[in-house]
Image (tube, rainbow, N blue to C red):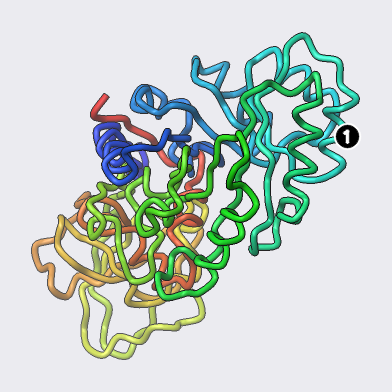
């Protein structure tokens, strides 16, 4: 069996959910499992998410997959619905929906459903992605209250754009906008993403929506998951399939981007961009060989990458190479590759073997 394997640790996921509870003790929790649980496999995560008050996904396809996998909790569609016929499915399966604009509100006003839907009005408090102008909040709330397709338990939500940077002024501005729009309204409120949970207690309100922190990564600038008391849920590793000595002056990989400064021991690891490892990760991107630090050499190939074994004279065929996870935060690989941990986790390929522990 090809050795590229992602170990999914459900005990770590439970720990991280507990960390959310400790940081926001008075809020209820939407566990965000969109993008197939950020690449971890949403269905395989369900046994560790029983303590979450609800789940959140991007769209109805993801919500239906969770129900098929046995999820019994409420499920929120963060992007709402895209067509009117989705509303009946939402009512059938007990999904909650976000209303992001006038068109979405009109779909609800025209709907005739077997039971009303729990609904969240989405405000644009400054990110300028989805949501209505906060100045129109009260008018929208009144129309939603009058709508037979909307349940009495109405919510208002928004999303923080810059909460990963505690010094950024935008978060305080968004908080003020959200407070001005919702104070005094008989609604449940939700504003915090993972960064809000970690760094902005004033944004916790009634519900929080942790995503990346559940998987053991920190969204905060300059911080890794372990810095925030989180444990990696995914450890991605592979094995050495060849070990060789490459002479001084020889180049390694496509286009010869790395030249050996001396005779070097080099390991070939069975993993590449077709497995989800970032192709643009440069020479020097950290890896672990048998749990000790090393680095990549040259360009990442589709199915393989090269590893520096200069400080690993004992390394041999079959030895373990950790790409990220336990002992090597995914944030470090993402930083080297010019991206974010969210992307590399979500990009894990289907052909990578998955093994669940801590269940």
Side of 172 where 4 appears, left or right:
left
- Kindly indicate the quadrant of the structure image that contains residue 215: top left
Which residue is situated farthest in the left direction here? 314
Q: Residue 127: percent from the left, percent from the top?
A: 64, 63
Secondary structure found at label 1 = helix
Q: Residue 92: percent from the left, percent from the top?
A: 70, 12
Task: Give me the residue at 78% from left, 41% from top.
Answer: 140
For label 1, the crowd category at 10 Å Cα-Cα, with few meaning under 14, some 14 to 19 and many 20 or more, is: some
Task: Give me the residue at 24% from left, 63% from top.
Answer: 243
Report the label total.
1
Which of the image's four quarters has the C terminus? top left
Which of the image's four quarters has the N terminus? top left
- Kindly indicate the quadrant of the structure image that contains residue 26: top left
Q: Residue 42: percent from the left, percent from the top?
A: 48, 31
Task: Give me the residue at 73% from left, 47% from top.
Answer: 137
- For the residue pair 199 and 282, the one nearer the viewer reads as 199
Q: Residue 232: percent from the left, percent from the top?
A: 29, 47
- For the residue pair 183 and 314, the one nearer the viewer reads as 183
Task: Give me the residue at 48% from left, 50% from top.
Answer: 193
Which residue is situated farthest in the top direction here? 114
Q: Is residue 89 above or below residue 272?
A: above
Which residue is situated farthest in the right direction here? 110
Q: Which residue in the protein does label 1 denote?
A: 106
């Amino acid at each position: 069996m090809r050795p590229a394997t992602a170990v999914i640790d459900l005990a770590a996921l439970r720990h991280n959910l507990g960390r959310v509870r400790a940081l926001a003790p008075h809020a209820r929790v939407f566990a965000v499992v969109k993008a197939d649980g950020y690449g971890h496999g949403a269905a395989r995560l369900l046994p560790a998410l029983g303590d979450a008050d609800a789940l959140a996904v991007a769209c109805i396809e993801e919500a239906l997959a969770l129900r098929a996998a046995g999820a019994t909790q409420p499920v929120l569609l963060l992007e709402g619905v895209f067509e009117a016929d989705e509303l009946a499915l939402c009512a059938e399966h007990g999904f909650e929906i976000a209303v992001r604009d006038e068109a979405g509100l009109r779909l609800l006003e025209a709907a005739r459903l077997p039971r009303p839907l729990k609904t969240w009005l989405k405000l644009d408090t400054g990110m300028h992605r989805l949501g209505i102008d906060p100045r129109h909040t009260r008018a929208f709330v009144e129309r939603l209250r009058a709508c037979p397709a909307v349940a009495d338990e109405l919510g208002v939500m928004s999303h923080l754009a810059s909460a990963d940077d505690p010094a950024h002024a935008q978060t305080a501005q968004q908080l003020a906008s959200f407070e001005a729009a919702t104070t005094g309204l008989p609604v449940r409120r939700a504003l915090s993403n993972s960064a809000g949970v970690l760094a902005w207690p004033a944004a916790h309100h009634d519900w929080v929506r942790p995503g990346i922190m559940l998987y053991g990564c920190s969204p905060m600038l300059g911080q890794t998951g372990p810095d925030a008391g989180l444990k990696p849920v995914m450890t991605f590793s592979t094995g050495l399939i060849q070990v060789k000595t490459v002479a001084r002056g020889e180049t390694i990989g496509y286009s010869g981007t790395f030249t050996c400064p001396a005779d070097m021991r080099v390991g070939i690891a069975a993993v590449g961009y077709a497995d989800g490892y970032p192709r643009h990760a440069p020479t020097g991107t950290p890896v672990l060989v048998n749990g000790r630090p090393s680095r990549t050499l040259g360009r990442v190939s589709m199915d393989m990458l090269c590893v520096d074994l200069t400080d690993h004279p004992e390394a041999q065929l079959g030895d373990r190479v950790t790409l990220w996870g336990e002992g090597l935060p995914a944030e470090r690989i993402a930083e080297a590759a010019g991206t974010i941990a969210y992307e590399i986790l979500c990009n894990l390929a289907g052909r990578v073997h998955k093994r669940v522990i801590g269940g």
